[in-house]
Image (cartoon, rainbow, N blue to C red):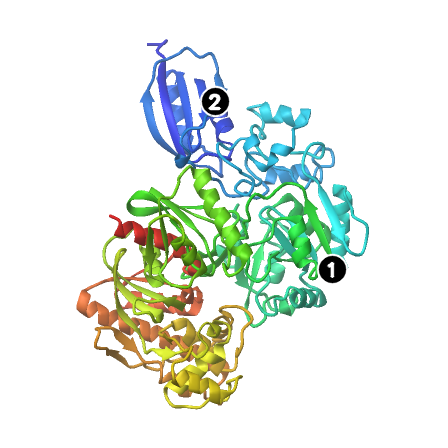
């Protein structure tokens, strides 16, 4: 018995690629005194271990219990195997395996060990902007194909120097098999280009020139992990104004990057904002997203960082280059996406110089290729938890599941705005990082690249497509032109299905889908709907009184059009119309380019315009965001009549809100607060009436309107007080970025 040897073959899945998992198992094997081998397959890790039975058991138990911080392992199988008498534990060469088992790692932040080494004057990577190890650095944006080995990445063009080679091949080194491994001798380098001076092609010189430019109030395009940022001093009002004027981006909030400082790293954050404990924890999370936090009174940030809003989007530096810049500039920096008009973030030096050369003073490039863009993720605290508003670098590709098995692989192509794509097979769904708007050639080209890349990386070829039912969406036309069967999904069915899928629910529930507009079953523009049912089987049971939008799609950026529409519907005049009122009202009266809508988002637009907050917006959602920020007081709701129409749809009438919204004797803050309270009352009234006929007790909230904290939190409180169980998003955004996942869930349900 003392000499008994037990052998086991262990299969490990989950996030085990690109997180130092094989060297971890090597060290675990040594600690447990077992022998054998471990190897990568395309989406999993296989290990053969042998030794004393209790030693083998300790090894298997430690796989999950002691896993590296970035790993998410799952032991899928432990099978008896013949003992081959291995004298040691070895890491053996990867094999191709089945890529459909892969779990592609997102890009990672710079870990504490690497930051300490970068700050050490005696270290050979002192001040090196591309330092990394197995626990940090780029992943998704540099992987060309699986398995995740250096020749299959953007680092293939950087041969390792002898010192790096020794680290790379030593299983006990924290850089063992770190595919982005680099140093100043063999790795990527910085260069700086500006119209005002000579090019700077050495890393230290380029870094110094960039810091000097930022300190001088200049705007610099800085290449990061997933694309370029446009950066300037966030406390310099003139620099921020120049950036807004030249991009152009007159009003949309700008993200701010703040240096790590103090015991918890957030000392500098607290100089500009007042983060809650949840917000503070997420700022420090390895994904390093942008986190919305309340701006501190007297903050040194320029007022134009987030005009009209009480919150500011903050993030800590996540790449070594960002840490160096923030440390040397000595203050917060604007770090807004280097893109054009909602397109995907730019990644190539030549392209950003050609397209944004008018907007910046200098470009800080590096020569590590970015194989696909990944913008920064964005989170906001809603209903007591941090919720994603945008999936991106650090948290995407996002792994989700389906409530049921999908018969054939499917690609869901998402929405026209805030586009993401979702690849689904079996019960797995992978949602891409944020792509952006698809109304430009580059937007569509990046969409096509990401869709193709996901299928290639995971070894899953879509045999069916799912798209929005809107007849004119660019991405839907794209899907219909492919040689594959297409499942068309109504926009709000996708919203509802995304929420049901995220919670694993296949039973009936009531889902409020409130947003801007989406193509509805009756060919009108929905957006204030309550849907009863389950994925594949939705019935509209509640909505708002419909109205016609003069100018159609233009209303999304011109809130005054929604305001005029409401007034005209009830026979009132309004002086906020900015076009020839006679011609416009005549076209509206004749239903010319004036589609019918029930969108709650357009009601928010109208309220923003009628209160004088926002007549014409420079970005989608500006009016509702400013209306929420203005609603700083407690207020009583105005009851909205609720009637059941001939189609058994309960409809709330918004008309009683108009006299209040137009009453200039009431402070704007009070009018904004009354509007919010009234819509919450209407939502709860609809839920109660629907429950009377269906006995449904679970209520979901989804759609872009529920990015609004006042609306969402009041609705949750009131619904729970009325005896409902309330469901909200935690993994995918409630806005159109979650549509692709919802399309996959809805299509899978229909294909059962």
| Image quadrant where one finds the N terminus | top left
Q: Is residue 484 above or below residue 55?
A: below
Q: Is residue 395 visible in the rendered structure shown here? A: no
| Residue 547 x, y percent position in the rendering | 36, 79
Q: Residue at x 47, y 26 (%)?
A: 25
- Assess whether mark 2 and mark 1 are in contact (beta carbons under 8 angstroms): no
Q: Residue at x 53, y 59 (%)?
A: 440
Find numbered disc 1 in the image and state the secondary structure of the residue it sits on: loop
Q: Residues within 10 Å of mark 2 (few under 14, many from 20)?
A: few
- The foreground one among 497 and 441 is 441
| Residue 618 x, y percent position in the rendering | 56, 71
Q: Nearer the viewer, mark 1 or mark 2?
A: 1
| Residue 376 x, y percent position in the rendering | 54, 53
Q: Residue at x 66, y 36 (%)?
A: 117
- Checking the image for residue 218, the label placed there is 1
- Checking the image for residue 241, the label placed there is none
Q: Which quarter of the figure has residue 735?
A: bottom left
Q: Is residue 487 visible in the rendered structure shown here? A: yes
Q: Disc 1 to disc 2, how far (Cα)?
A: 54 Å
| Residue 611 x, y percent position in the rendering | 49, 82
* N-term-proximal mark, 1 vs 2: 2
Q: Is residue 381 above or below residue 19?
A: below
Q: Is residue 551 left or right of residue 648?
A: right
Q: Is residue 697 left or right of residue 18?
A: left
Q: Residues within 10 Å of mark 1 (few under 14, many from 20)?
A: many
Q: Which residue is mark 2?
A: 31
Q: Is residue 632 above or below residue 427?
A: below
Find numbered disc 2 in the image and state the secondary structure of the residue it sits on: helix
Q: Is residue 164 above or below residue 686?
A: above
- The foreground one among 131 and 452 is 452
- The foreground one among 60 and 479 is 479
């Amino acid at each position: 018995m003392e000499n008994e040897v037990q052998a086991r073959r262990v299969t490990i899945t989950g996030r085990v690629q690109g997180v130092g998992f094989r060297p971890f198992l090597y060290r675990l094997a040594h600690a447990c005194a077992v022998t054998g081998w471990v190897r990568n397959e395309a989406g999993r890790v296989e290990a053969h271990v042998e030794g004393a039975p209790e030693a083998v058991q300790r090894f298997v138990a430690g796989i999950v219990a002691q896993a590296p911080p970035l790993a998410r392992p799952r032991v899928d199988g432990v099978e008896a195997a013949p003992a081959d008498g291995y004298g040691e534990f070895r890491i053996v060469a990867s094999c191709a395996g089945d890529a459909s088992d892969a779990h592609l790692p997102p890009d990672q932040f710079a870990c504490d060990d690497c930051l300490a080494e970068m700050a050490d004057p005696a270290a050979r990577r002192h001040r090196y902007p591309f330092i990394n190890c197995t626990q940090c650095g780029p992943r998704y944006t540099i992987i060309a194909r699986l398995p995740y080995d250096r020749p299959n990445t953007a680092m293939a063009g950087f041969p390792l120097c002898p010192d790096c080679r020794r680290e790379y091949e030593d299983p006990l080194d924290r850089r063992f098999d770190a595919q982005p491994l680099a140093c100043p001798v063999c790795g990527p380098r910085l260069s700086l280009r500006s119209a005002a001076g000579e090019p700077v092609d050495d890393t230290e010189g380029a870094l110094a020139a960039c810091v000097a430019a930022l300190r001088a109030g200049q705007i610099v395009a800085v290449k990061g992990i997933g694309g370029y940022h446009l950066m300037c001093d966030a406390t310099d009002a003139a620099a921020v104004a120049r950036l807004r004027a030249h991009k152009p981006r007159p009003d949309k909030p700008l993200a701010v990057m703040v240096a790590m400082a103090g015991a918890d790293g957030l000392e500098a954050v607290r100089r500009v904002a007042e983060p809650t404990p949840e917000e503070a924890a997420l700022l420090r999370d390895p994904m390093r997203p942008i986190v919305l936090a309340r701006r501190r009174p007297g903050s040194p940030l320029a007022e134009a960082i987030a005009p009209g809003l009480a919150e500011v989007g903050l993030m800590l530096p996540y790449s070594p280059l960002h840490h160096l810049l923030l440390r040397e500039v000595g203050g917060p920096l604007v770090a807004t996406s280097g893109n054009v008009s909602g397109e995907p973030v730019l990644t190539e030096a030549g392209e950003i110089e050609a397209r944004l050369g008018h907007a910046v003073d200098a470009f800080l490039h590096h020569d590590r290729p970015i194989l696909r863009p990944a913008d920064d993720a964005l989170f906001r605290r809603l209903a007591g938890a941090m919720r994603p508003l945008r999936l991106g670098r650090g948290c995407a590709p996002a792994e989700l599941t389906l409530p049921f098995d999908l018969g054939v692989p499917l690609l869901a192509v998402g929405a026209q705005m805030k586009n993401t794509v979702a690849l689904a097979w079996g019960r797995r769904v992978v949602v891409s990082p944020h792509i952006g708007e698809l109304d430009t050639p580059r937007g569509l080209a990046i969409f096509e690249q990401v869709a193709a890349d996901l299928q290639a990386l995971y070894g899953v070829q879509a045999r069916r497509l799912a798209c929005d039912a809107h007849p004119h969406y660019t991405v839907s036309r794209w899907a219909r032109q492919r040689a594959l069967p297409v499942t068309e999904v109504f926009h709000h069915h996708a919203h509802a299905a995304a929420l049901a899928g995220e919670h694993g629910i296949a039973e009936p529930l009531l889902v409020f889908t409130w947003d801007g507009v989406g193509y509805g079953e009756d060919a009108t523009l929905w957006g204030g709907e309550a849907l009863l049912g389950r994925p594949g089987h939705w019935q509209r049971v509640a909505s708002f009184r419909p109205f016609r939008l003069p100018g159609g799609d233009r209303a999304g950026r011109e809130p005054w059009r929604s305001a005029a529409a409401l007034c005209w519907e009830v026979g009132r005049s309004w002086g906020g119309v900015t076009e020839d009122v006679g011609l416009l009202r005549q076209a509206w009266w004749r239903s010319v380019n004036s589609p019918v809508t029930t969108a709650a988002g357009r009601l928010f637009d109208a309220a923003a315009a009628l209160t004088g907050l926002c007549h014409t917006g420079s970005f989608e959602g500006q009016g509702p965001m400013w209306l929420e920020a203005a609603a700083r007081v407690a207020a009583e709701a105005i009851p909205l009549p609720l009637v059941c129409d001939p189609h058994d749809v309960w409809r709330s009438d918004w008309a009683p809100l108009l006299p209040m919204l137009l009453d200039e004797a009431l402070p704007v803050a009070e009018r904004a607060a009354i509007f919010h309270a009234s819509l919450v009352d209407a939502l709860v009234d609809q839920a109660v009436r629907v429950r009377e006929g269906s006995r449904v007790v679970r209520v979901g909230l989804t759609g872009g309107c529920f990015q609004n904290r006042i609306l969402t939190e009041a609705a949750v409180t009131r619904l729970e007080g009325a005896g409902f169980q309330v469901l909200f998003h935690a993994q995918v955004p409630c806005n159109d970025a979650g549509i692709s996942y919802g399309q996959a869930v809805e299509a899978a349900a229909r294909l059962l």
